[in-house]
Amino acid sequence: MTDLERTNFDRILPSTTGSPDWADVMSRSRAQLGRRRRRVVVALAAAALVALGTASAFGSVREFVRDVGFIGLPPQGAKDAAGPTELNGTVGPGYTILLKKGAVTVKTLKPGRYRLTVQDNSNVVNFNLRYSAPLWRPGWTMGITEGVPFIGTRTVTLTLKRGRYTYFCAAHPMRMKKTFTVK
């Protein structure tokens, strides 16, 4: 063994008494290999935890892409440039609240853009729309005919994504409340 080789071994391996033999060198090399393997396993476990946490935060990547769209593409089931689908809401007279697509009361819709026109026929009720999101997403409530004394028509354009929606009167939420699902 030359002095150069001995210097390289001394840098890599801790010094020992006497001359290192091949079995000693191999056993120390295996020990370093074991430490390296443990580091790789810990790094892979951490990456798996991050991936699992991200997937659970979005439900799944497939659902996230389907609901939100991907790099400028509309969500699955969204209408093309033909324009939003028309929905008609009616609140009042009395304690009635309705949401229709054409002549049919809405129970389910597909994700996409909708133009909602609400006719408020009473000064003691109003029309609100609430999106009930899963735990990891924020929900929202929109007052379509804000303020109870309002009488008249309001139109809004909405992009509805998968989930459960409730339309209700804020002044009478237990009596005037209905739901529909976007799927």
Image (cartoon, helix red, strand yellow):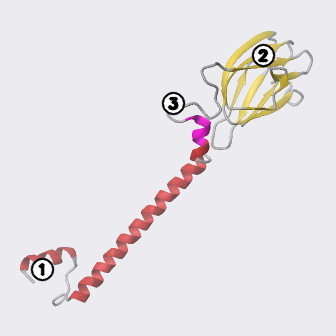
Q: Is residue 175 visible?
A: yes
> Circle 1 is placed at which residue position?
6
Type of the residue with mark 2:
Val
How far separated are the C-alphas under marks 1 and 3?
62 Å
Q: Nearer the viewer, residue 15 or 29?
A: 29
- For discs 2 and 1, the disc positioned in front in the rendered view: 2
Q: Is residue 34 left or right of residue 97?
A: left
Looking at the image, tell me whether mark 3 or mark 2 is earlier in sequence order: 3
Question: What's the magenta bit mostly, secondary-structure-wise?
Answer: helix
How far across and how far down the image is residue 100, in percent?
81, 22
Q: CA distance from mark 2 to mark 1?
A: 88 Å
- Residue located at (7% from left, 79% from top): 3
Disc 2 target residue: 118
Taking the view exactly as shown, the residue that stands out farthest to the left is: 3
**Mark 1 or mark 2, which is nearer the start of the sequence?**
1
Q: Nearer the viewer, mark 3 or mark 2?
A: 3
Classify 116 as above or below 131.
above
Please tell me how crowded label 3 is: few (under 14), some (14-19), or many (20+) other residues with Cα within 10 Å: few
- As helix, strand or loop, the secondary structure at mark 3 comes to loop
Tell me which residue sits at (79%, 11%) in the image: 150
Which numbered circle lies on residue 88? none
Q: Amino acid at mark 1?
A: Arg
What SS does tag 2 mark? strand
Q: In this rendering, does residue 145 appear at all?
A: no
Dot 1: element: helix
Q: Which residue is mark 3?
A: 72
- Foreground mark, 1 or 3, reads 3
Q: Which region shows up in magenta?
A: 64-69
Residue 121 in the magenta stretch? The answer is no
